[in-house]
Image (spheres, coloured by chain):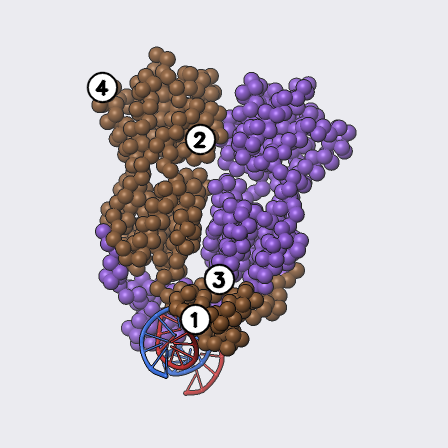
Chain colours: A brown, B purple, C blue, D red
Amino acid sequence: MEYDKSSVGKTITIYDIAEEAGVSASTVSRVLNGSASVRKEKKDRIQKLIEKYNFKPNALAKGLSDTATNTIGIIVADVRNPYYSALFVACEMAAEKAGYNVGLTNSLGEIDRECHELDLFVQQKVDAIIQMGGRVDDLITDDEYARKIRSVCTSTPVIVTGKLDKAPVYSVVIDEGAGMNLVMEHLISYGHEKIALVGGNMMVTSTFYKYRRYQENLKSRGIKERGEYVVNSAYDPESGYEAMNRIFELDDIPTAVIAINDFAASGIIRSIREHGMRIPEDISIVSFDNTYIADLTYPKLTSVDYNYKNYGQALIDTAIAVSMGKECPAFQTVEPKLVVRESSGPCKK
Amino acid sequence: MEYDKSSVGKTITIYDIAEEAGVSASTVSRVLNGSASVRKEKKDRIQKLIEKYNFKPNALAKGLSDTATNTIGIIVADVRNPYYSALFVACEMAAEKAGYNVGLTNSLGEIDRECHELDLFVQQKVDAIIQMGGRVDDLITDDEYARKIRSVCTSTPVIVTGKLDKAPVYSVVIDEGAGMNLVMEHLISYGHEKIALVGGNMMVTSTFYKYRRYQENLKSRGIKERGEYVVNSAYDPESGYEAMNRIFELDDIPTAVIAINDFAASGIIRSIREHGMRIPEDISIVSFDNTYIADLTYPKLTSVDYNYKNYGQALIDTAIAVSMGKECPAFQTVEPKLVVRESSGPCKK
DNA sequence: GTGAAAGCGCTAACAA
DNA sequence: TTGTTAGCGCTTTCAC
């Protein structure tokens, strides 16, 4: 089969409509955008033709002459991660409500990709760029990246889900400390004191802050922190699994573990199972992100939720406001809440 | 904080570069695209300036004057489903290699959204549109949708991961029958004969074909099909859970169950656990899609894989070829393979 | 090898 | 209310 370009109906433009309606292109443009009043009679005639030809104005031409494209670019570390896909979909919905489109690209956490995608969005003249995860998660901002963002910022506002001290970006971040507070209160109210923190990497801002708050909670409650209960690794199931296996090598096993995210938690569950222990009877698990994974493990995970809908809305609201030159706080925070499911329970001392 | 648009450096254009280099805009365009030879001396001078100002040509203007935008629009039923996100990422990678960009939108399976997103991509002058899931999965094509696609096809080639008899689209689909053959062979070689098929909806093409092949396999092996072993529902964990619970109400429980996808499988696992049975010792499970969920359940799932990388590549190759007017088969197929993990084992009669 | 000029499709003054 | 005109930034003949 061949796609015969020659058979393609000549693309119809605003001029074709104008001609057939016996008016000028401007008038057609006016009814298209409702930007000025047009005599009802002409208006009807034009609208008929628009329907007849199923005319859709060329977005490229429109974007070229307008100042805005009504498009927001979103760069995500990896949509395959349900945390990001949930947040992306929330953004998409919020944008749609506001009459904006979104574009999505994956950086896979690679700095070259991130820079390239930033360029691409700049070239496409998006009204704003939202960067979710990737370099903006780094505890220590990469200099090359900061330089890049600074250059992008001169033409396009950038909103990040992390922090970037060295560049004029807008941050909308989760209050990780508050999340950890919820987790600790939950576990301690169940009588747990031997609490492990498993998975993640301290060079990632969110993980670092979680860890700090974990320490503070222990301290303020007079529980001594045990270094061997904090096992760093990564954010995937396998890492969670291996990290938890290491915990099982200890003489004194914790009664509760905090997983850095739901993925890691799934690996932790596997490790616990393989060691013949029950959840939550023998060991409780609480994790972060409350992705759909929390609902599909056995037992279901108690997990910290971020209200993705609101989070996405905040991101989009900020992007739109900033792109229109409105005043906006440079730093906003979203409040987490704990969703209690089956994986956590009382400590049987 | 306020984003001061006035402080924004004047966007620099090809003309600015040309002026400073003492050449014409055409020449700058030439070195930008390597579309014609330019005296080395000038070329160097121009490239210096491009670097100096970090100049990126306006994609809108380029798209307006060019015939192609080098962009492929992808409409997906729901990126939050790992099947789609995996396929999308595969497409993105394949596109990148070919020098194309991709745009993504979610239809959430709603026909209005799909139509709207088709329009949007047409307006953006994407070179081709890939439709993954949604209406193209319907066993019976929706007429309104077919009409829409037909109108889109006159200007933009459409590639679908399903079928659409009433419109000139290109199909690249999974060979569902072959997938089911693999599953049946696997189970039957383990001695299973009491095999249930759980989850999904027969109005979805892929599910319908799976079911047909399931029947054929039973028949050709002289195993009588039992209607009560085929429980329809949907594609999420909860549906799988409920469907499996219904199976447990039967007098004669199957020794193996085929889950319509990994999500449903996770719910099935839960049901089996709650009924105090072991996997795979008492009941084997095999599912479809081989998403990362298959790796994170306990036990890990035996699942049918589609080689997402190749699948995405085929989709993109087709999109690019068709958009360039090249000859292309209207129907292509991707071959699945079975990834055996822990959830399936011998039938202990 | 290089520049001038026209045009891609739309919007936004400015006149009328 | 409506049409005319001049761009938006880039590519691409067509001369030179």
**Disc number lying in front (1 or 3):** 1
Which of the pair A56/B178 is nearer the observer? Answer: A56
The answer for how far apart the CA atoms under marks 3 and 2 are is 40 Å
Secondary structure of the residue carrying tag 2 is helix
Q: Residue at x 52, y 37 (%)?
A: B291
The percent coordinates of residue B129 (x first, y second) are 54, 56
Rendering coords of residue B20 (x, y %): 28, 73
Q: Residues within 10 Å of mark 1 (few under 14, many from 20)?
A: some
Q: Nearer the viewer, residue A320 or B191?
A: A320
Q: Quadrant of residue B330?
A: bottom right
Chain ID at mark 1:
A
Residue A286 in view here = yes
Q: Which mark is residue A222?
A: 4
Q: Viewer-nearest of labels 1 and 2?
A: 1
The numbered mark at residue A328 is none
Q: In this rendering, is residue A200 above or below B333?
A: above
Residue annotated with mark 3: B123
Amino acid residing under circle 1: Val
Discs 3 and 2 lie in a common subunit: no
Callout in the foreground (4, 1) = 1
Q: Which residue is under mark 1?
A: A38
Q: Is residue A312 left or right of residue A11?
A: left
Contact flag, marks 4 and 1 (Cβ < 8 Å): no
Is residue B161 rendered to the left or right of residue D13?
A: right
CA distance for labels 4 and 1: 75 Å
Earlier along the polypeptide chain: callout 4 or callout 1? 1
Which of pointers 2 and 4 lies earlier in the amino acid sequence?
4
Determine which residue is flagged by label 2.
A294
Residue A284: x percent and y percent?
A: 39, 21
**Which amino acid is tagged 2?**
Ala
